[in-house]
Image (cartoon, rainbow, N blue to C red):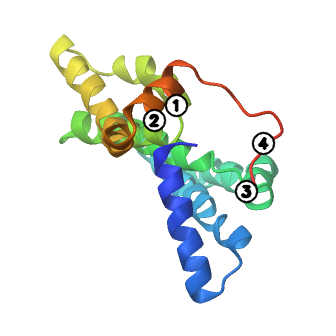
Amino acid sequence: WSPLWVMVIFQLFKISNIFKIPYYGLIKVIPIICDAIISVIIYKIFLNTSLDSKKSIIASSLYALNPISIIITSIHGNFVSIPLVFLIISAYILYCKKKYSIVYSSLALGFAIMSKIWPVLFLPILLQKIKTFRNRLVYILLSVVPLLISILPLYLTNKDTVIKRFLKYESMPGWWGF
């Protein structure tokens, strides 16, 4: 799990205890909210590119009502929609917005990478939109800032363990979520 998700589930656990809300239900709320935000962004992207409200609603609904997405998020409790929402926000900002798009898009991508590592695979695709070498370098550097900030406290408290975990990752057989 990423440092971001560990912080989130810790806070949700505290909220669960304070308000006596079942933890297994509460932990699914954030990914469900992320799925709703993804649907809205898909609508905005299609509206921005096709200028057709009906097509935008259809595209957004295809994601929002997709049974696979619903099952993964609300039943399994998987949190893949958290990095996905940041990745889609990053692409939306870069492709649809003009002002400060490199800064905000790279930071959104950084939060996606901080949530899970797989969004880094989209970096080459996003970099194609950026014209100059200097701006590409700024984009790459800003994309790692959120991850570095989230890892820094762990590194400062236990440097050897952090280095060992990053350089010698080992999965744990039998651990499949909650």
Q: Which mark is residue 77?
A: 3
Q: Which residue is mark 4?
A: 175
Which of pointers 2 and 3 lies earlier in the amino acid sequence?
Answer: 3
Mark 1 belongs to which amino acid?
Answer: Ile
Give the residue displayed 55% in from the left and 57% down from the top.
Answer: 34
Mark 1, other Cα within 10 Å: few <14 / some 14–19 / many ≥20: some
Indicate the secondary structure of the residue bearing disc 4: loop
Mark 2 belongs to which amino acid?
Answer: Ile
Give the residue displayed 61% in from the left and 58% down from the top.
Answer: 31
User: Do the residues under discs 1 and 2 have CB atoms within 8 angstroms?
Assistant: yes
Which residue lies most toward the bottom here? 19
3D distance between C-alphas at marks 4 and 1: 19 Å
User: Do the residues under discs 4 and 1 have CB atoms within 8 angstroms?
Assistant: no
Indicate the secondary structure of the residue bearing disc 3: loop
Mark 3, other Cα within 10 Å: few <14 / some 14–19 / many ≥20: many
Mark 4, other Cα within 10 Å: few <14 / some 14–19 / many ≥20: few
Tell me: 82 left or right of 102.
right
